[in-house]
Amino acid sequence: VLEELQNEFFNDLRRIIVKIY
């Protein structure tokens, strides 16, 4: 479960980074 949560977190983080750039 922790792994899935981390994966989702990084996924959102990448989306935010893409929005910035």
Image (cartoon, rainbow, N blue to C red):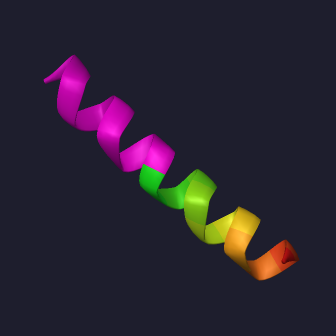
Camera-nearest residue between 2 and 10? 10
Please state if 18 lies on the left or on the right of 5 as rendered: right
Q: From the viewer's perspective, is residue 12 above or below residue 2? A: below
- Identify the magenta region: 1-10
Q: Residue at x 32, y 40 (%)?
A: 7
Is residue 18 a member of the stretch shown in magenta?
Answer: no
Q: How many marks?
A: 0
Q: Residue at x 84, y 77 (%)?
A: 21
Please state if 2 lies on the left or on the right of 18 as rendered: left
Is residue 4 a member of the stretch shown in magenta?
Answer: yes
Q: From the viewer's perspective, is residue 18 above or below residue 14? A: below
**Residue 9 at x, y percent in the picture:** 46, 43
Q: From the viewer's perspective, is residue 2 above or below residue 11? A: above
Please state if 20 lies on the left or on the right of 1 as rendered: right
Camera-nearest residue between 11 and 2? 11
Which residue of the protein is positioned furthest toward the left in this rendering?
Answer: 1
Q: From the viewer's perspective, is residue 14 above or below residue 1? A: below
Q: Quadrant of the N terminus?
A: top left
Which residue of the protein is positioned furthest toward the right in this rendering?
Answer: 20
Q: Residue at x 36, y 31 (%)?
A: 6
Which residue of the protein is positioned furthest toward the front in this rendering?
Answer: 21
**Residue 8 at x, y percent in the picture:** 35, 48
**Residue 16 at x, y percent in the picture:** 70, 66
* Majority secondary structure of magenta residues: helix
